[in-house]
């Protein structure tokens, strides 16, 4: 059995602005979503990027994006179906400190949102 390769640091635009979501009423547990899983959902489902573009932006392989996306979708579905809280927590991620050239023209660039944040 070989030694597992260490996880590569994943690049995200910025941490999520909201870290906790709860169902109305009494929650039946908590699902933990990593910042990297949040970023995959944001890039693929909200921004509409392909998995290849998402992988490039996060500095990971496309297969890693696929694994993170499947994990995130399963966790969110579990929370919705079973009435669980969703808690987002940091993992081994690198946060962009300034807009990258590929963010030019992106309508929901997190750096642009920081200027108009609450």
Image: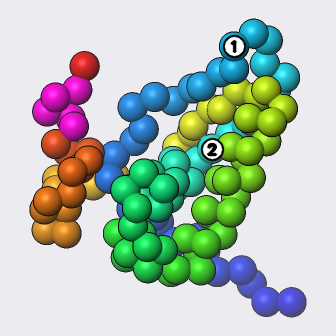
Sequence-wise, the earlier of marks 1 and 2 is 1
Q: Is residue 114 magenta?
A: yes
Residue that label 1 marks: 24
Residue that label 2 marks: 33
Does residue 12 lie above or below 9 as drawn? above
Q: Distance between the residues labelled 1 and 2?
A: 19 Å
Is the magenta region chiefly helix, strand or loop? helix
Does residue 74 lie above or below 118 as drawn? below
Q: Does the magenta stretch include residue 3?
A: no
- In-image side of 118 versus 90 (left or right): left
Picture coordinates of residue 40, whole percent (x, y): 50, 58
**Residue located at (14% from left, 59% from top):** 105
Picture coordinates of residue 115, whole percent (x, y): 14, 33
Q: What stretch is highlighted in magenta?
A: 113-117
Label 2, residues with CA under 10 Å away: few <14, some 14-19, many ≥20: many
In which image quadrant can residue 118 be found?
top left
**Residue located at (16% from left, 42% from top):** 112
């Amino acid at each position: 059995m070989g030694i597992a390769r260490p996880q590569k640091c994943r690049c995200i635009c910025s941490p999520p602005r909201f870290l906790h979501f709860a169902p109305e009423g009494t929650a039946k547990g908590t699902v933990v979503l990593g910042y990297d899983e949040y970023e995959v959902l944001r890039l693929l489902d909200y921004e509409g990027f392909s998995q290849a573009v998402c992988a490039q932006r996060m500095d990971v392989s496309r297969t890693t994006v696929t694994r993170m996306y499947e994990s995130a979708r399963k966790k969110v579905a579990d929370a919705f179906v079973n009435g669980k809280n969703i808690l987002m927590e940091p993992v081994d991620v690198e946060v962009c400190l300034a807009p990258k050239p590929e963010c030019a023209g992106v309508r929901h660039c997190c750096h642009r949102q920081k200027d108009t944040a609450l």
